[in-house]
Image (tube, rainbow, N blue to C red):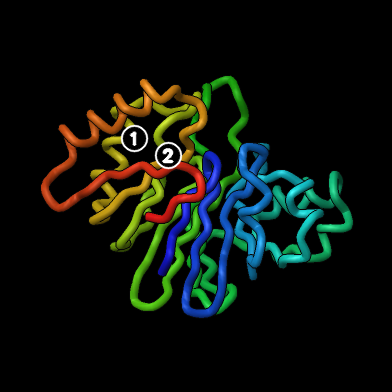
Amino acid sequence: MRITKFGHACVRVQGDGGVVVIDPGVFTDPAALEGADAVLITHEHADHVHPDHLRGSGVPIWTIAAVERLLREQAPEVADRVTVVRPGDRLEVAGTAVEVVGEKHAVIHPDYDRFDNSGYVLESGGASVFHPGDALTPPGREVDVLLAPVSAPWLKVSEAIDFVREVAAPRSLAIHDRVYSDIGLDMVATHMGNLLPAGQAFERREPGRDL
């Protein structure tokens, strides 16, 4: 499995059967979708789904009902390529096994309604990777790589560290990192290095770089 970090929350996963792109949002270079065989979208926020990127590609899309409704309103020409998934679903996408995990976005503020959000565990070639979207819902199983959110209005560094500890993947790759400056991201990496137990590595990659 080859994992390439793109802008903010977008990651490209090359498995045995093809290329799956997760959450190509407004901060993502459209090149992330070149040669893709499938797109997975965790929820409806613009930093995770950008209709213009999807219009420029004929790639089939798997996502939750809330995103399907958004695309039907904002990009009806894309909506016919959408397959709706639900928490707990197990499917095969571009030759990669996918499990749908969780159903709610993390709490941004108690006065806001909560959005739907489902993460995805992808497995190919004996390796697994988990993208939680904007949630701190663990996958309920061991994974080899956690795509770990590190900066957001709904997240503080202690929560990010506790989530990485709870999932306990041998490797965690920082995602959802556009909100912080380089100084802030260096601080997150320092805290992760200080507080993660032995056997858990935390890494950050610039857009376009492989894990």
Q: Which residue is mark 1?
A: 160
Q: Badges 2 and 1: C-beta atoms under 8 Å apart?
A: yes
- Quarter of the image for residue 111 reads top right
Give left or right: position of 66 versus 179.
Answer: right
Name the residue rendered at 34%, 57% in the picture. Answer: 145
Quadrant containing the N terminus in the rendered view: bottom left
Give left or right: position of 102 versus 42.
Answer: left
Callout 1: 10 Å neighbours few (<14), some, many (20+)? some
Label 2 to label 1, Cα distance in Å? 7 Å
Decide which of tag 2 and tag 1 comes sooner along the chain: 2
Name the residue rendered at 34%, 35% in the picture. Answer: 160
Name the residue rendered at 40%, 61% in the picture. Answer: 129
Give the residue type at disc 2: Pro
Q: Which residue is mark 2?
A: 149
Judge whether 6 appears above or below 98 on screen: above
Quadrant containing the C terminus in the rendered view: bottom left
As helix, strand or loop, the secondary structure at mark 1 comes to helix
Name the residue rendered at 67%, 45% in the picture. Answer: 49
Residue 130 location (% of width, % of height):
41, 57
